Each structure stands twice: as structure tokens, then as C-alpha cells.
Image (cartoon, rainbow, N blue to C red):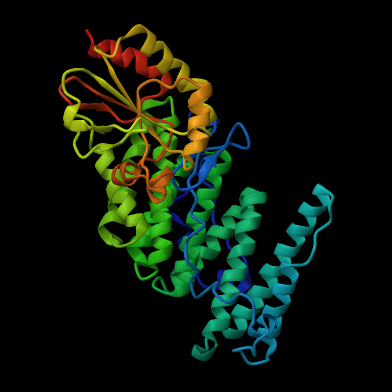
Amino acid sequence: MRISRFSRLSSVMLVIGIVSGCGDGSAEPSPETGTTNADKAVRTADAGPVESTSGNAGVVASIDNAGKSEASDGAKSGSENGQKSQFPDDEATQTLREIQQLRVSPVPPDLAEARKTRRERNERIVDMATKVLRLTMNEEVRKPQFHLAVGQLLEARFQMALAGTQEDVDLFYADVHALNERDDKSIAAAEGVYYIARFAHTKAGLVGKTQPVWFETLSRWAREFADRFPEQAPRAASLLFGAARSCELHALASTDKDLSARLLTESRLCYTALAEKFATTDQGQEASASLRRMALAGQTLSQFSGPTLDGGFISSDDFSGKPTVIFFWDSESSEFTADLLPVLAKISTALPSSKLRMVGVALDEDEATLNEYLESHKVPGQQIFFTQGEQRSWNSPLVRFWGIAQSPTVWLVDARGKVISTSLEAAELIPAIQQLLK
């Protein structure tokens, strides 16, 4: 299903859709398929190891650090938290309490029975949340109850859309559309857009390899959320960063050049929005670093230096005169050991240091672990490794300044110090070096 903007949703869907607990959104064509090699494990700056759980899975970055909105904050009533409830003990509050109790009730151990139970539970929650909406939607003083009911409704719709049929997806979208029709600046509308972005993020992780349109969909909804609800800065920043990084990682893993170019464009759009609108956040600063790295190709490398394990010091000021291979790596990366290290060893054997410089940036946190690895694996070149513990691993000044997204990462710099690429795959490295040495 190709996901559309609100303007493409059914124009006849009014607020009655959410009051009745159903909608009539129409199905759209299935996403185009694409081919990637994203099913191998990589280590990323934001989520540690990212591994596919199926042949259809895509590589995605986490958005789980997003802040809560008013619609979902305090989903447990005060009495459940050991405090006096902030709501009157009326029918709406009692129903919200029942919903919460239903959410935490156990499910059968049998997988099929568990799925059936979750489905029935979510259907009941939709009915109960709709009842609360009907009771509270027109009273200003009852907005907190209304918002909690919205959150419960959307969570149930979200879960059913992920596990159910096209009709479940249509109902999910129709309810989000209804919230936006009612008041497109409201907390409830923001919650709806956030859930749509979450849905795209989850689908990208589940089926993004064969349906990469979900990455583009995630990017567009993340940017829409940030444009429309900038006051929800934690959520907006997390969505933008998750979308930007996910699109970038999948683009780097893709063997489809057109798809890769499209996803890198989406990635840059999200990084740019993040850097411009949420510059003071951690994600905003990392977005600026990522954009700096993405603009490096064709530029002379500068501001790249660090201490080495052997007590020396390396600086890009000294890179002229011969090509340089820079590789960011860590000893726990199976991809580095299995794929990249043999290529580096082959290059090191074929080319003397007078012809090619090799520089590693070790992202291990523990020096003893790194040294133990180096004793059993011959890693060519000098290894940059910062002596201060707080500057190691993903906190390396080089990682933070250049927004390194994953380990391993390979850069190639020519003899004049100009960056050729910041995203070479292991299989691409030897041909790229041969081209430079012609």
C-alpha cells in the first residue's frame, strides 16, 4: 500500500468516523519492490547492532527515545500510580482504567492463541476508547481524558494495522484523518501523525528490503510532524533523526542506484530540517555532523586527526602525496572481520606503504579488548585511538564531528587530499584504489 498525505485520504471522512470507531479509507497500490543486501549485521552510532529478523527486513535506526505527548503521558491513572487520580470518578475514567487493566492482562503462551487474544483485546480497546471519546469530546475540562482515549485508540489501531489486514490499515488511517479533520493543530492530531510515522518506521524495519517505499514514507511523515508540531521538539527531533539515519543506512546497503539516490535525498532533507529547526538538540548537532560528512566527497579533507595506539599522531594535513584509505572499525563487528579485513590485508600485501597510506579509527571502548584483537588479527595501518575514555567508541571526536553512521565505514582520499568517497563497500575498495593509481 502506497501511503499518502492527508489530502489524499477520503475527503468524506469526518469526525463521526472516530466517534463511531471506524472509517472507510480506501486501499492504494502496493509499494514498489527493491533489492538490498541489508540483511547483514552492522553496528550503528544510535542503535548498536542492527540485524534483520527476516529476508524482507530493512535497516532502521531507533526512534524510541522520542518524548511523550500529552495524549499518551500519564496513560496510567493517578490511582494506579499510587496517587489520587486527577480525573473525576466518572464513567470515562472508569473506562480508561479498564483499558489500562486490559492492556497489561496476560496472553496465552501459545502463539496462535496469543495473536487471537491480542486481536480481541485491541478490538475491545477501540470500542472502549471510542466510548470515552464520545463522553468527553465536547467538554474542555475533560480534554485530558479525551487525550488519553485518543492515545489508547491509536495504539490499538496501530497494533491491528501491523498484524492485520488492509482493512485494519485503512481504519487506522481513517481515524488519524478524522482527528486531523476535527482540529489539525490539536494534541490529538499530533498524536495521530506521530503514530503514522511510527507505523512507517515499523514497516520499514519489517519489510523495507522488499518494500523500500516505507523508508521514503517515514521521511515524509517525520518532516510533516516536525513542520506541523515543532512544539513537540523531542518527538520531532527523534522522528527526523530516525528517518534520516534509516534512509541513509538503507541507501548505503542498497544495490539499486536509483533507490539509493532517492533515499539519500530523503536522508538529507530530514538531516537538514533537524539541523535547522532543532539545532540545539543532540540529534540536531549530529544531523549537522552527518551533513558535513555527506558533503565531503570532492572536498579536501581537513579537521581529521588523532592520537595512535603506538604513541604517534595522525593528521589529514599530512595526507598529500599518496592515496589514503581511512576505515572506522571495531573488534566486535563481524562484518569488519569477515568482509573488510581480508580486503585490507590483500591491499596491504599488494601495495607498499610508499604507495598507499592506511589509517584505522578504532571504535572500541576498552583498550585491552582492542589490543587482544590486534594480537590475533593483523589490522594494517596506524590506528587512531583516543586515550581518554569519554572520547572512545561512538563518543570519538572524529565520529561526532563527521557523524559516522555505522561500523565499519570506509573512506578513500586521493594523493592531493581530496575525498573520493565516504561510503565504500569492501568489494568496491580495490577497484576504487586501482582507479586512483592509474
Q: Is residue 330 above or below residue 14?
A: above
Residue 73 appears in which quarter of the rendering?
bottom right
Residue 135 appears in which quarter of the rendering?
bottom right
Is residue 37 at least partly visible in the picture? no
Q: Is residue 105 above or below residue 251?
A: below
Residue 144, image x and y in percent?
A: 54, 83
Residue 66, image x and y in percent?
A: 47, 61
In the drawing, does residue 177 fall left or right of residue 319?
A: right
| Residue at image point 18% right, 26% down | 417
In the drawing, does residue 257 fall left or right of residue 19?
A: left
| Residue at image point 75% right, 64% down | 121
Q: Nearer the viewer, residue 51 or 301?
A: 301
| Residue at image point 62% right, 65% down | 22
Q: Nearer the viewer, residue 376 or 64?
A: 376
Residue 90, image x and y in percent?
A: 68, 91
Q: Nearer the viewer, residue 344 or 147?
A: 344
Q: Is residue 400 above or below residue 278?
A: above
Counting every numbered tag in the picture gives 0
In the drawing, does residue 428 fall left or right of residue 204?
A: left
Residue 416, image x and y in percent?
A: 15, 22
Is residue 171 at least partly visible in the picture? yes
- Pick the quarter of the image with the C terminus: top left
In the drawing, does residue 28 fall left or right of residue 421?
A: right
| Residue at image point 36% right, 58% down | 282
